[in-house]
Amino acid sequence: MTLSHADVRRILEILDTAANLESLDITVGEFELHARKPGAVRSIRQPATQAAVVRAIEAATPAADAPTAVAEVEAPLAEAPPGLIAVRAPMVGTFYLRPSPDQPPFVAVGSVVQAGDTVCLVEVMKMFNSVQAHAGGTVERILISDGKPVQHDQIVMLIKPAQEG
């Protein structure tokens, strides 16, 4: 059995949404996945079988009718303010505004972007995922500092749509 990119993304989404799961260590063949929520304590455990890992993931996945977790102390912006379009993190990872440390940022506040332009990267386990603007306009706010962790679906920047006409 091998894990695809989609499998890894799903596992990270499960970790992100599971209230009572702080970390996951999965080994499939030569592939190892070590994922932790920010602030989780690293513990040394014996390797689990694949079946046990699948059962743990299923048990940690919240049921549709389960109550949601208590709000964070400093909750990120949940919805875009009226008149602005949210750019959201596609997965849990590290937010980067630059393609590499020695390169200029993709965008800054005031930058004009077109739909489909890359505006940032989210890195997960050395895999860099481009995040595109869904609409053209002007970058109004960047809500995350370069190199900081982001959660799945977290708003990372706001774009003021271009006026048509």
Image (cartoon, rainbow, N blue to C red):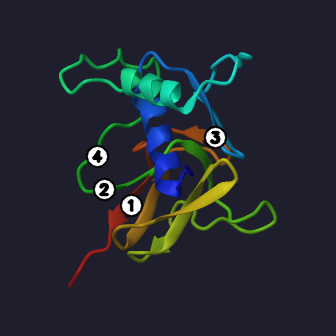
N-terminal of the pair, mark 2 or mark 3, is 2
Instruction: Measure the alpha-carbon separation of dots 3 and 1.
Output: 20 Å
**What residue sits right under mark 4 in the picture?**
81
Q: Which residue is mark 3?
A: 148
- Tags 4 and 2 touching, CB below 8 Å: yes
Q: Which of disc 4 and disc 3 is earlier in sequence?
A: 4
- Rounded to the nearest angstrom, the CA distance separating label 4 from label 2 is 6 Å
Residue wearing tag 1: 159
Residue at the spot of label 2: 84
* Element at label 3: loop
Amino acid at pointer 4: Pro
Q: Position of residue 73 (x, y in %)?
A: 45, 17
Callout 2: helix, strand or loop? Answer: loop
Q: Nearer the viewer, residue 102 or 126?
A: 126
Mark 2 residue crowding within 10 angstroms, few (<14) / some (14–19) / many (20+): some
Distance from the alpha carbon under mark 2 to that under mark 3: 23 Å
Please say if 118 is above or below 80. Answer: below
State the residue at coordinates (44%, 39%): 13
User: What's the residue type where badge 2 is placed?
Assistant: Leu
